[in-house]
Image: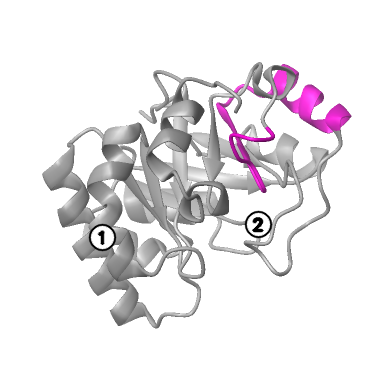
Amino acid sequence: MINRNPFNEWTVYLVTHDKWCPFNILIKKLNGIINAGVDIVQYRDKELNDKVYLDKLIKLKTKIKMISKKVLLLANDRVAEAKLADVDGVHLGQSDLSPDRARKILGSTKIIGLSVHNRKEAYKSFSEPVNYISIGPVFSTKTKLTASPKLSSGFIKWILRESPLPVIGIGGISIRNITDSMLNGMSGVAVSEGILSSRDMYNDIKALKTRTRI
């Protein structure tokens, strides 16, 4: 049986990005990142070939599990590499492998997340074999060059009311722009630039974890 809710508490979810923090620096900062309160790391690098991505994914997994067995590691998009590295799961976009096919490859115990941007995608996700959905961008973002338009507050309220799945907010989020009204009903936030480019990464993560706006 698929665990429909892997999020037992408010979740801070880090999406890596080489622009904001190169891999070798990320590895060095992982101890502080995890100790500050990050619960999930999604390894995202669209530029790498599959072999190099797999090698780095395994290295990242080894480092993370040395620090904490509780922190989850997800691959971005790459289902085959997620299976080979035996990480905790994968996050899929709308143009990636379908959740049904990913579930068949990964099995029932792995976590699968899915990005949704509108009601049509959201309704479809409710009946798919995924553990959570991410909605975004909540704010304007520089992480994706081809990001979708910023979500309306009406859509965010609707999906938080209707979704049977945990909802993670993503896109331009930082401790300086989150609000209580935005957070109500979400299971957590996924952050990239807001953590990785911070001059005070440790305290910003701690503030995100306690949902305290700076």
Q: What count of labels does the image hold? A: 2
Q: Between tags 1 and 2, which lies in front?
A: 1
Question: What secondary structure is found at the residue carrying circle 2?
Answer: loop
Give, as a three-letter code, the residue at label 1: Ile
- Mark 2 highlights which residue? 94
At x 64% / y 17%, what residue is drawn?
185
Crowding at dot 2, Cα within 10 Å, few <14 / some 14-19 / many 20+, comes out as few
Return the x and y of residue 175 as percentages of the image width and height: 59, 34
Return the x and y of residue 120 as percentages of the image width and height: 80, 42
Return the x and y of residue 129 as percentages of the image width and height: 50, 39
**Depth check: 202 or 84 in front?**
202
Asked if 150 appears above or below 84 in the picture, the reply is above
For the residues labelled 1 and 2, the Cα–Cα distance comes to 29 Å
User: Within the magenta stretch, is there residue 6?
Assistant: no
- Mark 1 highlights which residue? 27
Q: In which quadrant will I find the N terminus?
A: top left
Q: In the image, is 65 to the left or to the right of 127?
A: left
Q: In the image, is 111 to the left or to the right of 126?
A: left
Question: What secondary structure is found at the residue carrying circle 1?
Answer: helix
Q: Quadrant of residue 26?
A: bottom left
Residue at the farthest left position? 66
Q: Quadrant of residue 128?
A: top right
**Depth check: 34 or 128 in front?**
34
Instruction: Please state the extent of the stretch shown in magenta in the rendering.
Output: 153-177
Give, as a three-letter code, the residue at label 2: Gln
